[in-house]
């Protein structure tokens, strides 16, 4: 585990200059702050959000920085066609996409385990939280990988940074769907790293403590009274750091922001006993083989 002070979070931000950064859920909150930070350091930014008015407001702010050609589109991340249109808009304009941040997410929207009965039959649960926090992210990642792969320049900045939560690690009372989706983000990142490392695509996940966003309900704000929240600006800076860190050894790492403390970088965890050792050995061999095939393809 490595501690990274706030003064270091933008150390590699210059790598984002003239790169194309795509962020979902960026009409406000963490996504908006990250978009502004990338733009401040010279990136072209494309944002998508279901809040059309918020998108327009954010784009106006983005245009105050060096590049004045940022893109903002209305995007429901649960709508496949909306996401395709967002990626196509970015690629058509700039010819490359370099950083993908599936940030869109909501808090607990349903009430798992509480049945609603209509005409004597139970209705299905409200899975909106899973639709946005999981399916929407999978859509973004599914599109992001081939777009990032089009940028085949050796050593190029190519990153996918997911948004987890302390709920990825800690049980959250009253939020089973939210916890399930955030646990899934951690598993998704770990699996993506194995598949994308040979292609030079960097993946990571940010786990902020409760941040000062609208995702925190009034009830939770009351519950957290007296407990420091993580400023959105620090979460955004952590996203920039995780995206632009040139050290390939930190790909697939976890980045945690526990309350108001410095960013923590945690290495890849592995189970190494028994059958897990055999699995790890096979994965290492697969990565070596993939890297060899990629090297031959470039010759």
Image (spheres, helix red, strand yellow):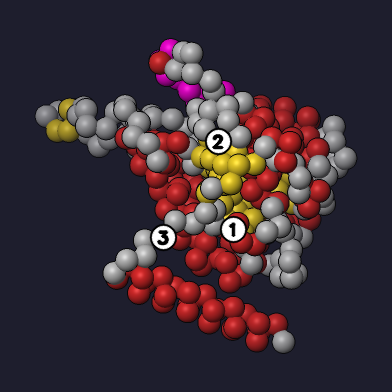
Q: Is residue 153 above or below residue 167?
A: below
Q: Which circle marks residue 270 in the picture?
A: 3
Residue 214 painted magenta: yes
Q: Is residue 221 above or below residue 206?
A: above
Per the rendered image, the range of residues in magenta is 212-222
Say which of marks 3 and 1 sits in front.
3
Pointer 1: residues within 10 angstroms few (<14), some, or many (20+)?
many
* Front-most of residues 216 and 140: 216
Mark 2: which secondary structure?
strand
Residue occupying image coordinates x 72% and y 41%: 8
Q: Is residue 249 above or below residue 282?
A: above
The residue pinned by badge 1 equals 251
Q: Disc 2 versus disc 1: distance between alpha carbons?
A: 17 Å
The residue pinned by badge 2 equals 257
Marked residue nearer the N-terminal end (2 or 1): 1
Q: Quadrant of residue 60?
A: top right
Q: Disc 2 versus disc 3: distance between alpha carbons?
A: 22 Å
């Amino acid at each position: 585990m490595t501690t990274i002070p706030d003064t270091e979070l933008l150390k590699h931000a210059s790598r984002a200059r003239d790169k194309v950064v795509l962020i979902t859920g960026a009409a406000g909150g963490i996504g908006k702050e990250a978009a502004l930070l990338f733009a401040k350091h010279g990136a072209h930014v494309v944002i998508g959000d279901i809040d059309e008015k918020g998108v327009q407001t954010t784009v106006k702010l983005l245009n105050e920085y060096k590049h004045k050609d940022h893109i903002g589109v209305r995007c429901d991340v649960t709508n496949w066609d909306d996401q395709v249109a967002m990626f196509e808009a970015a690629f058509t304009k700039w010819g490359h996409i370099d950083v993908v941040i599936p940030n869109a997410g909501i808090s607990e929207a349903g009430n798992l385990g509480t049945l609603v009965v209509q005409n004597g039959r139970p209705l299905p649960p409200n899975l909106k939280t899973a639709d946005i926090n999981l399916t929407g992210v999978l859509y973004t990642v599914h599109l992001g990988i081939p777009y990032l792969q089009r940028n085949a320049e050796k050593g190029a900045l190519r990153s996918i940074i997911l948004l987890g939560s302390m709920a990825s690690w800690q049980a959250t009372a009253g939020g089973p769907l939210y916890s399930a989706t955030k646990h899934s983000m951690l598993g998704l990142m770990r699996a993506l790293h194995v598949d994308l490392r040979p292609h030079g695509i960097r993946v990571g996940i940010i786990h902020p403590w409760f941040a000062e966003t609208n995702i925190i309900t009034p009830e939770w704000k009351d519950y957290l009274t007296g407990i420091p929240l993580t400023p959105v600006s620090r979460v955004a800076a952590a996203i920039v750091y995780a995206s632009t860190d040139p050290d390939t050894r930190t790909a697939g790492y976890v980045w945690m922001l526990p309350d108001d403390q410095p960013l923590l970088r945690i290495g890849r965890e592995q189970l190494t006993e028994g059958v897990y050792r055999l699995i790890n050995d096979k994965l290492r061999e697969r990565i070596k083989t993939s890297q060899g095939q990629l090297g031959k393809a470039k010759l």
